Image (tube, grey):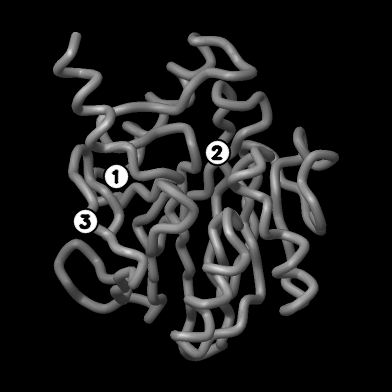
Amino acid sequence: EGQRYPSESNLTRRGKRFTSKTASGNFMTGLTFHQFICRSDNYGLLLHDHKSGATAAIDAPDAGEIERQLDAMGWKLTHVLTTHHHGDHVEGNLALKRRYGCTITGPKGEASKIPGIDQVVSGGDRFNWDGREVLVMDCPGHTLGHIAYYMPAEEAVFAGDTLFSLGCGRVFEGSMEQMHRSVTQFATLPPTTRLYCGHEYTQSNARFALAG
């Protein structure tokens, strides 16, 4: 499942899935999380509600792989929640929209760079996805308009390329001060929160840390 600081994923392209539970193990809302590797080191993540049939992808790094995973699960994509504009996170947007007619949500500050965007959100916004509250966190640093999505009821935050296991994202557009604020705000979330990031960099981050 999502990473609790720090841990290492052993995902394969077949992926893994689980149904959202509370810290005590009681089933909450019946939302299934299906996580898999795509491209070379991107995480793909699908959220599926078995009652409503709604399915959201966190970013769209690889349309073909996302479609294969959806077909294998028997799900139809209804939404894409975009964290930032980099190509390895939005490359699949238009192909997925053509096939499924999904709604694409993304950061207001990067709307012109996100293909097919329908709904814009900013840090501090709250919106409803399939009856669940989603809080938008402003995360400048990796890109200036980067955001994260936090679902309190699911005890899950989708951090994109802001925070990884054993490291953080590269600072391309923002400042180191901005990245520091973006990363440290995750520490204010409940300790039971699961972190879902955009890439599997655990081993490379560990090698970098040991080399220092």
In terms of depth relative to the viewer, which is nearer, 44 or 30? 44
Using the image, tell me which numbered label, if any, was put on residue 211.
none
For the point 27% across and 60% down, the residue is 11
**Disc 1 crowd, CA 10 A, few/some/many (<14, 14-19, 20+):** few
In the figure, is residue 169 to the left or right of 11? right
For the point 66% across and 42% down, the residue is 87
Query: x, y (%) of residue 65?
Result: 53, 68
For the point 65% across and 45% down, the residue is 125
**Disc 3 crowd, CA 10 A, few/some/many (<14, 14-19, 20+):** few
- The residues tagged by marks 3 and 2 sit, at their Cα atoms, a distance apart of 28 Å
| 150 in relation to 182, above or below | below
Q: Quadrant of residue 16?
A: bottom left
- Asked if the residue under mark 1 is in contact with the one under mark 3, i.e. CB atoms within 8 Å, the reply is no
As helix, strand or loop, the secondary structure at mark 1 comes to loop
- Reading the image, the residue beneath label 1 is 190
Q: Quadrant of residue 167?
A: top left
| 27 in relation to 165, above or below | below
- The residues tagged by marks 3 and 1 sit, at their Cα atoms, a distance apart of 25 Å
- Reading the image, the residue beneath label 3 is 10
Q: Could you tell which of marks 1 and 2 lies nearer the N-terminus?
A: 2
Type of amino acid at the residue the image marks with label 3? Asn
In terms of depth relative to the viewer, which is nearer, 64 or 17? 64
| 146 in relation to 24, above or below | above
Q: Could you tell which of marks 3 and 1 lies nearer the N-terminus?
A: 3
The N terminus sits in image quarter: bottom left
As helix, strand or loop, the secondary structure at mark 3 comes to loop
- The residues tagged by marks 1 and 2 sit, at their Cα atoms, a distance apart of 15 Å
Query: x, y (%) of residue 45?
Result: 46, 62
Type of amino acid at the residue the image marks with label 2? Met
- Reading the image, the residue beneath label 2 is 137
